[in-house]
């Protein structure tokens, strides 16, 4: 079993991977990182499932997202909550983010994600 520090580093890597332009354009990479029952409550107010993400995200321009203040909390032995802040360069907006990651047979997959726009970067 991995330590909490190792898991935190691994999930930080997965979260930042999902922000990379080449990953956001790859249906295969997104498919591997998102659970089949994935759901997102976006900062724009939309609710999206995995199929929507796979069909929409690869055609979008890179928004230029920077992540900071990453935290992780166990929800169970096989699920974890990550929280962090991002700055979206293309929109010049800050948002608070949270994700639920669940350990599946092939590794960790994101099952839930939510973004909330905030006026402050702090």
Image (cartoon, rainbow, N blue to C red):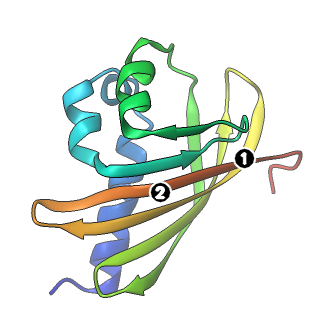
Query: In the rendered view, would you say 17 is above or below 28?
Result: below
Dot 2: element: strand
User: Around disc 1, counting alpha carbons within 10 Å, would you say few (fewer than 14), some (14 to 19), or many (20 or more)?
Assistant: many
Where residue 99 appears, as percent x and y from the top left, is 50, 60
Where residue 103 appears, as percent x and y from the top left, is 24, 70
Comparing 40 with 17, the one in front is 40
> Could you tell me how far apart the alpha carbons at marks 2 and 1 are, in whole angstroms?
16 Å
Which marked residue is nearer to the observer: mark 2 or mark 1? 2
Query: In the rendered view, would you say 122 is above or below 28?
Result: below
Disc on res. 112: 2
Q: Residue at x 10, y 66 (%)?
A: 105
Comparing 62 with 122, the one in front is 62
Marks 2 and 1, the one that precedes in the sequence: 1
Disc on res. 95: 1
Q: Residue at x 19, y 83 (%)?
A: 2
Where residue 16 appears, as percent x and y from the top left, is 42, 46
């Amino acid at each position: 079993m991995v330590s909490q520090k190792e898991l935190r580093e691994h999930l930080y890597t997965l979260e930042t991977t999902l922000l990379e332009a080449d990953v956001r354009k790859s249906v295969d990479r997104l498919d591997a990182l998102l659970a089949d029952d994935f759901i997102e409550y976006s900062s724009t107010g939309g609710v999206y499932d995995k199929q929507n993400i796979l069909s929409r995200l690869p055609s979008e321009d890179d928004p230029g997202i920077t992540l900071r203040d990453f935290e992780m909390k166990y929800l169970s032995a096989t699920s974890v909550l990550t929280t962090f802040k991002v700055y979206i360069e293309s929109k010049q907006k800050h948002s608070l983010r949270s994700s639920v990651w669940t350990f599946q047979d092939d590794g960790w997959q994101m099952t839930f994600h939510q973004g909330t726009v905030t006026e402050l970067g702090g």
